[in-house]
Amino acid sequence: MFYLAAICLMMASCADTADVRDARGGYRFKTTGKVTLQMPDESNPKATISQIVNLNNETGSFELVSLKDNDKVLLTFDQLNGDVYHTKGTLSGDELSFDAFTRTLDLPITTEYSDTLHIPYLNHLGQSKLRDSIITYTKTETEVFDITVTGNAKTYENNIIFSLNYKGQSQEDKQRLIEGTDIQMLCKKN
């Protein structure tokens, strides 16, 4: 009976090692999703407005390296634009959990400004009148946010799919906050 328990324990630990061995290696990744931006209303500083912002698609390479513990792994993300970030995690079967990590995120923010112009004209009686015309200006600027990334992932043969959550604030204006709970990262093995 003791030998049967020892064999089962050994097979289970080998299975975890095999999972890490099968999943480890180099991948390419693409991230997509949306975040909610909350910021002060410029026309009423006491009010807050929310805006849904599409993330710029991020691409790059991803490396999954096994550590000394059988199921512990190091996750390293190397974005095409040069940013590199990493965290540690655990791979158990097809589930990959990882420690929260921080990184920066470039986010395009679009704001609209309206202005009323008073345009003089002559009416049908030749009298000078003013006509109001509203002009709307749109401005898009990229702002850098410090974010915390949490979530989990699942492995599928040569793919890993991450479900990520982003939460953070702007480096320029600490009152601008973002949160996203449906960000997907697809990693395909090289």
Image (cartoon, rainbow, N blue to C red):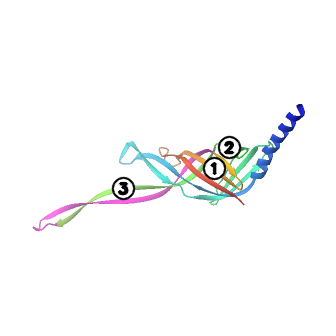
**Quadrant where the C terminus lies?**
bottom right
Q: Which residue is mark 2?
A: 97
Q: What's the CA distance linking mark 3 and mark 2?
A: 44 Å
Q: Which residues are magenta?
A: 122-151
Q: Residues within 10 Å of mark 3 (few under 14, many from 20)?
A: few
Q: Residues within 10 Å of mark 1 (few under 14, many from 20)?
A: many
Q: Which residue is mark 1?
A: 162
Q: Earlier in the sequence, mark 3 or mark 2?
A: 2
Residues marked 2 and 1 touching at CB (< 8 Å): no
Q: Secondary structure at mark 1?
A: strand
Q: What's the CA distance linking mark 3 and mark 1?
A: 37 Å
Q: Secondary structure at mark 3?
A: strand
Give me the disc on residue 113: 3
In the shown orientation, is residue 68 left or right of residue 104?
A: right
Q: Earlier in the sequence, mark 2 or mark 1?
A: 2
Instruction: Name the spot of residue 89 as percent of width and height, x first.
Output: 71, 44
